Image (cartoon, rainbow, N blue to C red):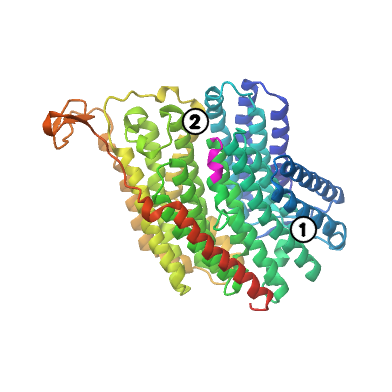
Amino acid sequence: MYDILFLLLFPLIVAAILLVFRNEKIRSIIVKVSAAIIAIASIYVAIEYIDGGTVLFDFENEIVDYLMLITEVCLGIVIFYLGIKHKKYLVSILALIQTPLMTWFELTKGHDISISNYLYIDGLSSIMVLIIGIIGSLITVYAVGYMKDFQHHHEGEPDRRYWFFFLMFVFLSAMFGIVTSNSLVWMFFFWEITTLCSFFLIGYTKTDEAVRNSFLQLVLNLIGGLAFVFAIVIIGSEHDILEFNKLLELGTESITVLLPIALLSLAGIVKAAQMPFHSWLLGAMVAPTPTSALLHSSTMVKAGVFLILKLSPVLHDNIAGEMVMIVGGVTFLLASMAAISQSNAKRVLAYSTIANLGLIVACGGVGVEAAVWAGIMLMIFHAITKSLLFLCVGTAEHHIGSRNIEDMDGLFCEMPKLAMLMIIGIAGMFLAPFGMLVSKWQAMTAFVDSQSIILIICICFGSAVTAFYWTKWLGKLVAIVSNKDNVEKTVHREEWVVLGALAALVIVTCLTFPLISEYMVMPYLGTVFTAGGSVIAALGSGNMYILLAMLALVLLLPIPFLGKTNKKIVPTYMCGVNTGNNLSFTGAMNCETQVSLRNWYMEGWFGEDRINKFGLVITIITILAAIILILGGVA
């Protein structure tokens, strides 16, 4: 148990130290050393508990409960004050409902409910600990170099990096708390800390847009938090339990259990930025890139899909599960379509994140072993690959002055190493030998077995448009434009180390995915589902070997291009007379014309306003209908 407590407390101690010591060199050392310690501790915890089933820890301490309650009330007061100060009265109203309700429950009915095990860890929690501890720590190290450039680009503004790093480490602590809390009250406490930290991180620059988007995130996640509170109050009042493992044991034996399960699922949907609540994640793109990577790859949104995957055994074949399936499937399809119309790289990554989380949510809603296997594997591969892409875009933006995909066709000349790393990330998201595609394959198999026509349509068409927008981006990266100077020399060492480590993780996880499945995912599934071996049977060992062979060939492909070459470089053919610099040609009437290669973004067909309105209508109706049916006694 002490190793779990270390993961909860050590990042908090580091955060406090970073708040006090504001010297840049000292901060750099503290962040790097602390990140290494957290990563090592995470690996140790995962190795210790990964295949041991569910391990529960008795940690009954009334003082800790009261400290959490006091902190909870203080957080509620802060949120209420912020809403009044910025005239965002809906924020204050939500805080005024949520905090008093939770406080009243904890001091009355909740106080009399005995909690045997406050903490726990199982296979899924161990996987999440690895994601948070390794990827989250790498992002904090990357932020050391990135925030130097960020501060340089904002010279006239006060240096508030101490606050930025304080929030990042508090965030890591809260995420460890979410994935190891068996007490629903404790889980909610950490859940709300991530919401408030996200608010401050998104609004870090204090621009009007940043403040507006930070409050949008706060409003939507307070709605999810309110659903979480209602779930706790109902399950505590009706069944006298406040432990997650006991909630799963009850299953869906009565309507009073199905309703809190649906409400917890709704909280997960909000946190995972699913339609109709997805706009907060799009707005979060105004934050510094490490924030985008931390919130959208390894922490904030992963808390939502983690909760839904944990609930998946009790979501099978009921109204709550149908709600989750439809919301996730529709979000995957429509967010993938919306990404087609985007040229801003961070918005493409944001919509891609929303879409892939939707697929994970849909897998959790199906609630069968094969689907949950696919969801967990998608979660692992997505966390690594998407963090690599977010950080690559951040580095590119600082050095070429743009995050627009249309400005990346000369990236191979300006930043060849970064372009190669970005290509690895994009390939990892959708190409055949890599893990994301293997997981989607299994998800499709599970959807076919579940006989859900809606999900089959969503994954087929959603995967097709996914390939469309990734291919467009990939095409811009491999286009070579001459006469552009290499600007990679100014990239900080911390950034290269982290980007290289993440690229290596993308390749290693793809090479070892059968081992990850066998020793990390399958043992967990064996503890929550009765049938075993169906996942491997569905994939087939022969198919696994074929995929591994394909991946090996992909890794061998660059070898002939290494070293010196005697190949002749010739001018580009332009349907006219090349002027000699590959950037313009002499065309009709002897006029010099600049070369312009641009993608077609199909705004008329896949414009985000049209797609989002359609998605909002479908998902809002789905959620309201599910809640009404459950309240009406339909299971």
Tell me the element at label 2: helix
In the picture, the disc for residue 495 is 2
Tell me if mark 2 has few (under 14), some (14-19) or many (20+) residues whose alpha carbon lies within 10 angstroms of its own.
many
Say if 187 sits above or below 14 in the image: below
**Residue 51 visible (yes or no):** no
Q: Residue at x 35, y 62 (%)?
A: 542
Q: Is the magenta stretch mostly helix, strand or loop?
A: helix
Image coordinates for residue 50, horizontal then vertical, percent: 60, 54
Mark 1 or 2: in front is 2
Disc 1 element: loop
Three-letter amino acid code at the position of disc 1: Asn
Say which residue appears at 71% left-offset and 62% top-offset.
244
Q: Earlier in the sequence, mark 1 or mark 2?
A: 1
Q: Distance between the residues labelled 1 and 2?
A: 41 Å
Q: Magenta span covers which residues?
A: 283-288
Q: Name the residue under label 1.
A: 117
Is the residue 176 above or below the residue 563 in the image? Answer: below
Q: Where is residue 194 in the image (x, y as percent from the top left)?
A: 67, 46
- In this view, the residue in front, 532 or 449, is 449
Q: For the residue carrying disc 1, how many other residues have a C-alpha within 10 Å: few (<14), some (14-19), or many (20+)?
A: some
Look at label 2 and name its amino acid: Glu
Q: Relative to 486, is 9 on the left or the right? A: right
Q: How many labels does the image show?
A: 2
Where, by quadrant of the figure, is residue 558 drawn? top left
Residue 345: image tag = none
Residue at 44% across / 46% down in the picture? 348
Q: Magenta span has 287?
A: yes
- Which residue is at the front of the view, 526 or 349? 349
**Residue name at image x 77 percent, y 63 percent:** 233
- Asked if residue 508 is among those painted magenta in the image, a careful observer would answer no
Image position, residue 128 (x, y; %): 59, 50
**Closest to the observer: 255 or 56?**
255
